[in-house]
Image (spheres, rainbow, N blue to C red):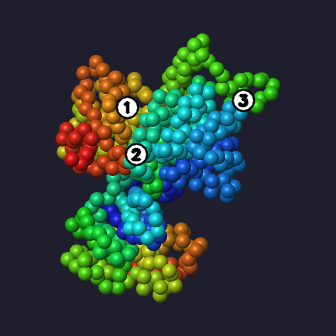
Amino acid sequence: MKEVRWHARAGQGAKTVSQLLAEAGLLAGSSVQAFPEYGPERRGAPMRAYTRISEKTIRRHDPVAAPDIVIVLEPTLVNEMNVAEGLSDEGVVLVDSNEMPERLKGVNARAIPALKIAHEHGLKFSNVVMLGAAAAAGGIPLVNIQDAAVKKLGKRLDADSLRAAIAEGYACLA
Amino acid sequence: MPVKTQEGAQLLTGGEAVAYAMAQIDPDVFPVYPITPQTPIIQTFAKLASNGKTTTEIVNVESEHSAMSAAVGSAMAGARTMTATSSQGLALMAEVVYIAAGMRAPIVMAVGNRALSAPLNIHCDHSDSMMIRDSGVIQIFAESVQEAYDHAVMATRIAEHPDVMLPVLVCQDGFTLTHSEEPLVLTPDEDVKAFAGKYKVPLPLLDVDEVTTKGIFALQDYYTELRYQMNAAMESAKTVIADVFAEYSQLVDRPFSMLEEYELEGAEKVVFLMGSTAGTIKDVVDELRAEGEKVGLLRLVSYRPFPVEAIRKALAGVKEVIVLDRSDAPGSVPSLHAEMAAALYGSGIDLRAHVFGLGGRELVPAEGRAIFAGEAPTHVALRS
């Protein structure tokens, strides 16, 4: 089972991509689960979301405590909390940043210039680029993650840009 | 257990799933007042209704108390009626929930179970359902999003059965299920409609050919008899629920039971609980079984009616039952603890009980292991 924890500020689309990763896992034939962690809701507040993907039927309903993949959509959060908390032995932290934040040195972490990539493809939000990277880290086929994203976001965003941005995020981990 | 990826599975939250089931049934009336904290249920139903999926009259009222009152009026008038609520909303409805049950209004209500204030909390426990424990409503608890959806499809058949005629609450854990996306298979619209059937209410108020009185007085002369009849209806509900579950099981090829037995074969220690945490405990049972421990799980699906005979039968030969209540009862013991003590009285089975999961503090597998080992505190994970 792969367990994923998403860190973001409310409004950055973490809940959406946590669900899209699950959707892609479902398309790939896995058992999945996606759930946000809510506090008092307000735009800009730190929030978390979770995705589970497993080859066995997922029955558990406890929060993800030891994530295999941590995705940080907002690099400033790295200074506000320990985003690597509970990271599994083989786990990796993927942070949306042009360079590796000081606080993550010593952690198995990768900086992905997702916002830059998103802008290059005419997209406002970097969440889909990080979704591509998360899918690569989670072993989900690229086509499944692209299909899931286009199905859900294709009405609002250009499908080709979406596919290209996701592919570039995916390639960062290849 | 390998993945049983059923054809056409899709991802929905538990809230969306039950709203979808309700929209498929297409009730006549749906009175609502989405008080905070809310679930996605009413929002999703309203969206489906706006998009033309239903012909339902959604009645926006000024409080949850009014929502339940409107539901009673609508049901008495002869309309198939549904609503949804959670936590403080159910608390505000409570007075009228008793009236709905007493007037034998077959209302179906989706509930996202959540803690009651104070302190303020928006997360899951079963305190809201417990508050209306003795109201005379049927309460069915789901473990997963799929099961919550399936229960919602089946609920009208139970509520409206002539031997029952009681409100049915389709309960699912707040957030843990209402806001979690899990894969589920939806039953085709035509199958849901055929299964639910056409609503036939006996003696509707608006039937001018056969005039009846609703909301009657019954004092020392008949109050006892009318309340007693609700016991009989609950007793009949046991058979009706079993029949409806069996019939729907045939339709969708998934098992349903008022009481799920998991690894009870040769089990000496058995955890007894309701809701989504059963999934976590099943994983723990598998781990402990692999280590040679004789453990199992008995999950209560039908909280009301409480299937006491089936519970006694399922637990025959077990040495110890560990009851987990997701609500507390300051000054005494919570509901499942007390009822299991009554159910097992004289059986010689040892009983241990814990309170867990209050205000959304989810039980984790390590705590599940500690519970089986007899090393958990009375209030699981209580901070000292």
**Badge 2 element:** loop
Q: Residue at x 62, y 18 (%)?
A: B218
| Mark earlier in primary sequence (1, 3) | 3
Label 3, secondary structure: give it. Answer: loop
Which residue bears the numbered disc 1? Answer: B335
Which residue is under mark 3?
B204
Estimate how packed mark 2 is, as few (under 14), some (14 to 19) or many (20 or more) residues with alpha carbons within 10 Å: few
| Subunit ID for the residue under disc 3 | B
Q: Residue at x 60, y 36 (%)?
A: B107
The image's mark for residue B118 is 2
With respect to residue A27, does B37 lie above or below?
above
> Which of labels 2 and 1 is toward the front?
2
Could you say which is closer to the camera, residue A110 or residue B5?
A110
**Residue drawn at (25%, 47%), measured in percent from left and top?**
B381
- The three-letter amino acid code for the residue at tag 2 is Ala
Up the image or down, B360 lies above or below B378; here it is below
Q: CA distance from mark 1 to mark 3?
A: 36 Å
Residue at coordinates 40% horizontally, 59% vertically from top-left? A39
Question: Going by the image, does B132 lie left or right of A63?
Answer: right
Residue B14, horizontal then vertical, whole percent: 49, 51
Q: Nearer the viewer, mark 1 or mark 3?
A: 1
Tell which of A97 and B91 is nearer to you: B91
